Image (spheres, helix red, strand yellow):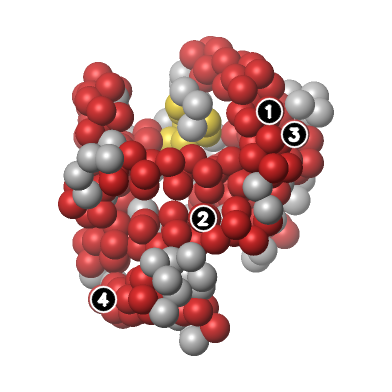
Amino acid sequence: MRVFQTRFLPLIAVLSLGVLVGCTAAPQGGGINDPYEEVNRSWHETNVALDRSVIKPVSTAYGTVVPDPLRKGLSNVSDTLGIPGTVVNDVLQLRLGDALHNTARFAVNATVGIGGLFDPATGMGLEERDSDFGETLYTWGVGEGAYVVLPVYGPSTERDAFGLIVDIALDPVGNLLGNPEASYKTGLKVADLADTRYRYSDLYESLMYDSADSYTQMRLTYLDNRRYELGTPIVAGEEGADQAATYDIYEDFYE
């Protein structure tokens, strides 16, 4: 994890400047702010090529070889290890009820759930209540900023990109674990992402490979979903906008 943070120090500096200086509120009526479209399209094409050559084959092999119950269990462990970071953001947002809820969820799954391998907490009414530092920045009044495409990670905004870096840097579990335990946590997260890519391969590939303009479609998908989560205006003037305002049409894809 520390190696990962060090490699991304230049990106941290750039994104920090972008968030602190350049972030503005989303355009009125939920428009699109994409001043870096040329660079973004280049990174999008690179990510598509990487998905075709590496990510898709790896996720397909993982989903085919590893039994579904084991994949689900590993994803549960990864999710459980991420809960302390969510609690930190709950506190920063002054959502103390959610902080207590997520703390209880972590305690139950880490003990009764055998280190998070199982998820008894959901059956006890302690469902997942996710959050991140991008949402914390939103709560503090930081604007969405421009749309950006990150290497490997994909669609984001200046605010959420900076939030992603902070979440990685301040991860309580990652910072407490030494080596090689920290690398195990990273490995679990990679396995979780591979499982998600495998489970939703048809939907993902219909967006990435089959769209007439996959860049525009992914941008719309991300912004609509993120703004829905935060309760801000979705992209105006697009087909399906009214339905998306009351129902998260991309919930399965991003969960």
Q: Give the quadrant of residue 207.
A: top right
Secondary element under disc 4, as helix, strand or loop, is helix
Q: What residue sits right under mark 1 in the picture? A: 57
Q: Earlier in the sequence, mark 3 or mark 2?
A: 2
Q: Earlier in the sequence, mark 1 or mark 4?
A: 1
Q: Is residue 188 left or right of residue 202?
A: left
Secondary element under disc 1, as helix, strand or loop, is helix
Three-letter code for the amino acid on which mark 3 is drawn: Glu
Tags 1 and 4 in contact by the CB under 8 Å rule? no
In-front residue for pair 171/237: 171
Q: What residue sits right under mark 4 in the picture? A: 96
Residue 192, percent from left and from top: 53, 48
User: In the picture, which quadrant includes the N terminus?
Assistant: top left
Query: Which residue sits at x=43%, y=36%?
Result: 157
Q: What residue sits right under mark 3 in the picture? A: 205
**Which-is-in-front pick, marks 1 and 4?**
1
Q: What residue sits right under mark 2 in the picture? A: 74
Residue 82, percent from left and from top: 37, 57
Structural distance between the alpha carbons of marks 1 and 4 = 42 Å
Residue 129, percent from left and from top: 44, 68
Structural distance between the alpha carbons of marks 4 and 3 = 39 Å
